[in-house]
Structures are given as structure tokens and as C-alpha cells.
Amino acid sequence: MINKLELSTKAGIIRKKLGEDESSPIDIFSLAQSVDSLTLIFYPLGSNISGACFRSGLSSIIALNSDMSMGRQRYTLAHEFYHLYFDKEMSSTVCSSKIDSNNENEQCANQFASYFLMPPTALFEFLQKLKRESGSEQLSLSDVIRMEQHFGVSHQAMLVRLREENEISTEEAESMQNGITMPAARLGFDISLYKPSPENKRILVLGHYIHQAGNLLKSGLISAGKYDELLLDAFRDDIVFGEETEGGDFID
């Protein structure tokens, strides 16, 4: 049986370990890049896989399906954090795209992800704020969109959590399933949360692998040619060929 209190505590522990407080919205992609010996890979993985985690004694890899929405990728990364930090008996996991998995270990990882991105106290406080502003205990689609934008989670993940908290019924959740992008845009929100990675970031490697390749070059253990080869293997043509983003750099 899933122990929600334990999973909430574990989520808080990892937030603290990564230098975050117990309630603020987080940039989980930046946090992942601060994890020692972790390589983060964005890659199109089809419609059935949301992500994967591979762990060894020297380094770890988390892969995210870049064809899924940014909100779902954030949720998947938090899910994989559970496998990385607490699933010690497994050296690798490949995770389904279904949030409502029947596998208990996957359910634990999903619950952890929900608490990691939407800490209970923070979610409660935001809910109370919305109810005071609207003067109603019943949540609207606009309220749901405001919450998922605040916490940076997918629409589906938000609906699942609100059902768990008995804030909406199954029927209400079903009625809010589709047609989210336009209402979010009309509320003034950036709709990138509901879209996949942009084309220039659909295949991308960040973190430990890139850093270690640089260390090997600096130490003289590999040649410049081998260094370039390692980077090209990691799809980092931008580093090898010195490609710049459109418009160059801006130092403010």
C-alpha cells in the first residue's frame, strides 16, 4: 500500500537536498543539472514511454520523452528522481506514458512526483487563494489552468492531483480534459507548458556526460578529435561547431 505521508516527506527531503524550500515552484530542469554525476537526455521516445532512469556506481542517466509536453516532461523528471534516489534495488527503469499505472512502484513514483512539484501545503494555500478570489468552493477550468501554470505541471497531472484531494469529481475532471491551450492563452499564459520541446531541443544531452568530456580533454586523456567525437555522439553539434542561437548572446 502506498504511504502518502512517507512519499510527501521524501519529496520534501529531495527538495531540500537540491537547495529548494518546501513550497516554492521550481525549475526542475536546472535542478537536475546540479545533481552530481547525472546526465539528462531529451529524446523522442514514441507514444508509450515517458522516460527512463539508468543508474550505476559511477553515474546516472535520466531520459525524457521530448515529444511530450513540457509540463509532462517536468512531471516525468520528478518521477525519475524517485527512481534515482529511492529505487535502490533497480539499476534501470523504463516508465510508461500512463500516469494511472497499476504498478505499485510506479504509483509511488507518480505520487512522489506530484508532491515534489506540488507540495501539499503550497497546493492548499494556492487553492484557498483561488477560492477566496472567486467566492466559490467549486473550481473552474480557469482555476485549474492557473494552478498548473503556477506549479509547472501537465494538465493531466493537475487533474489527477485535484481528484486525489477531492477538490474535483471524476465527472468534473472528465469535462476539463480537452481544449486547454486556447483557454490558457486567453488567460494570458505562455502555452509552451502544453507543447513538446522545440525542434532545436528535441534531441539534447546535458549534465555529467558533457562536463566529463571536457575534463578528459583538459587532463590530456583524450585528444581534441576524440572530444569532438564524444560531443557529436551526444548530439552537441552546437559545441563542436560553435553554433550560436539566433541573435547571439546578451549579457544583461
Image (cartoon, rainbow, N blue to C red):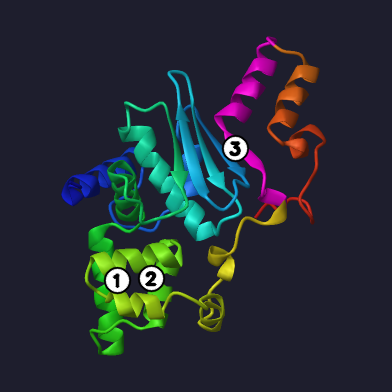
Q: Is the C-beta separation of discs 2 and 1 under 8 Å?
A: yes
Q: Position of residue 42 (x, y in %)?
A: 60, 44
Label 1: which residue?
126
Farthest bottom residue? 135
Q: Which secondary structure lies at badge 3? A: strand
Residue 92 place in picture, x, y as percent: 44, 30
Q: In the rendered structure, which segment of residues is drawn in magenta? A: 200-221
Give yes or no for residue 219 being in the magenta stretch: yes
41 lies left or right of 57: right
Real-space Cα separation, disc 2 to disc 1, in angstroms: 7 Å
Amino acid identity at mark 1: Phe
Closer mark to the observer between disc 2 and disc 1 = 2
Provide the residue designation for mark 2: 147
Q: Amino acid at mark 2?
A: Met
* Residue at the (54%, 58%) spot, across then down: 70
Measuring from the top left, give residue 240's x and y in whole percent: 78, 32
Task: Give the mark nearest the N terminus, 2 or 1.
Answer: 1
Across and down, in percent, residue 97 comes to: 47, 52
> Which three-letter amino acid code belongs to the residue tagged 3?
Leu
First in residue order: circle 3 vs circle 1: 1
Labels 3 & 1 near each other (Cβ < 8 A): no
Q: Give 246 or 202, whichever is nearer the viewer.
A: 202
Query: In the drawing, does residue 138 fall left or right of residue 53?
Result: left
The residue located at (38%, 76%) in the rendering is 174
